[in-house]
Amino acid sequence: MDETSLQWICSLAQIELSPNEKKSLIRDVEKLLEHFSVLSELPKKKPDFQTRRIFLREDIARQASMDMISGIKNNFPDQNRGMLKISALQPEAPIGE
């Protein structure tokens, strides 16, 4: 890593470094790059993954029968003129508060 690359990275990160911080960072990045170069020398081997098939059910829209609709309506606690009523999730605050 050179000074120009470091300045470019600092401008992207919007940070300012002192000359000592720059030298220290360049040393640290060079050490990291050395570690990665060692890793790149390892033999390239394909991972040995065991493949498993996952069977998912197909989502198929189906027409609801009148019996199904009636069953759902009958299980609802409250109705008004054929419409299902649900209770408020949060009680209404009195007006003026």
Image (cartoon, grey):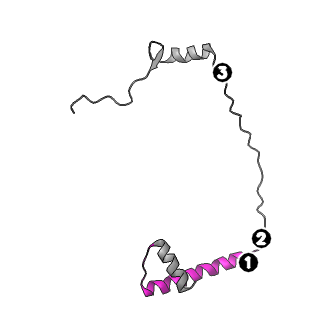
**Residue extent of the magenta highlight:** 14-42
Camera-side residue: 73 or 41? 73
Give the SS element for disc 2: loop
Query: Which of the two discs, 1 and 3, sits closer to the camera?
Result: 3
C-alpha span from label 1 to label 3: 61 Å
Sequence-first tag of 2 and 3: 2
| Residue placed under numbered mark 3 in the picture | 63
Q: Is residue 52 left or right of residue 69?
A: right
Q: State the residue at coordinates (49%, 87%).
A: 23
Residue at left offset 69%, top offset 79%? 38
Q: Position of residue 44 (x, y in %)?
A: 77, 70
Q: Residue visible at 52% across and 81% down?
A: 6
How much space separates mark 2 and mark 1, taking CA atoms? 8 Å
Quarter of the image that includes the C terminus? top left
Q: Which residue is mark 1?
A: 41
Could you tell me what secondary structure mostly forms the magenta stretch?
helix
For disc 2, the marked residue is 44
